[in-house]
Image (cartoon, helix red, strand yellow):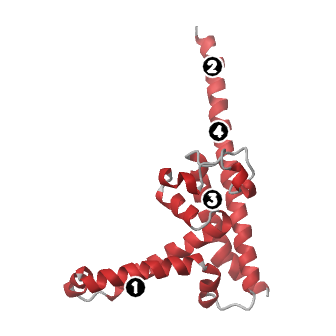
Amino acid sequence: MLIDIIKAILFVGIPVGAFSFVMMYYAYKNGYLTTDIAIEDAFKKHNQEYVSLSRKNKKELRYFHSKWISFGGGFYGLVALLTFIIIELLQFSNFWLGVTGWHDIAALFTLDSLINMFVDAIKNMVAAAIWFTYWPDVFDTPNFIAWILVAYVGYRLGANLAKKHLVTQREIKLNAIRESKIKAPELD
């Protein structure tokens, strides 16, 4: 059990936490979220007037934030987006590792290949949306619920750390501005 928890922290907790930090940090920095609302309340309908990270503002969001909202936002959407990115990167790298010549690249531009890519993209979106059925096949573990809990803890830690980091950055900038205003009259 202890080994399984350590694996969960390394393979799920840290990656989800890091991805959560990046996504939340840029959501705060771009003004999609406000630091006045708790993270667990940010995706609730009654807070949509304070939060532009929502379906109605999806067109104004950056690509990954838009996809995050497409998958439902919050923890579920973040893990679904991360799953989608991983599936796509694995397929991309598997293709390029299997290229043996120009004929493989030229075959990409046939109608059959384009249709297959479109179908694969849809299948990947569905697999990402139901990520809780995808990951048990990848991580053969008897404690999958523990892995989900570790991922959720990573999500919350990353999100809270992003919020604290941004608030600290703002305080440092405000203090620097205050100090420069205090020192400015002394120069006269």
Residue type at the position of mark 1:
Asn
Tally of numbered discs: 4
Q: Quadrant of residue 23?
A: bottom right
Q: Which mark is residue 59?
A: none
Q: Closer to the camera: disc 2 or disc 3?
A: 3
Q: Is residue 96 visible?
A: no
Sequence-earlier tag: 3 or 4:
3
Sequence-earlier tag: 4 or 1:
1
Q: Closer to the camera: disc 2 or disc 1?
A: 1
Q: Eyeballing the image, is 10 above or below 183?
A: below
Q: Eyeballing the image, is 116 above or below 33?
A: below
Which residue is at a point 50% across and 72% down the rendered structure image? 85
Residue type at the position of mark 2:
Lys
Residue topped by disc 2: 181
Residue topped by disc 4: 170
Which residue is at a point 75% across and 82% down the rendered structure image? 145
Marks 4 and 1: CB-CB under 8 Å? no
Residue type at the position of mark 3:
Phe
Position of 127 compared to 21: left or right? left
Q: Quadrant of residue 116?
A: bottom left
Marks 1 and 3: CB-CB under 8 Å? no
In whole angstroms, how far apart are the C-alphas of marks 4 and 2?
17 Å
Sequence-earlier tag: 2 or 1:
1
Residue topped by disc 1: 94
In whole angstroms, how far apart are the C-alphas of marks 4 and 1?
43 Å
Which residue is at a point 59% across and 72% down the rendered structure image? 80
Residue topped by disc 3: 21
Q: Quadrant of residue 130?
A: bottom right
In whole angstroms, how far apart are the C-alphas of marks 2 and 3?
33 Å
Marks 3 and 4: CB-CB under 8 Å? no
In whole angstroms, how far apart are the C-alphas of marks 1 and 3?
28 Å
Position of 89 compared to 143: left or right? left
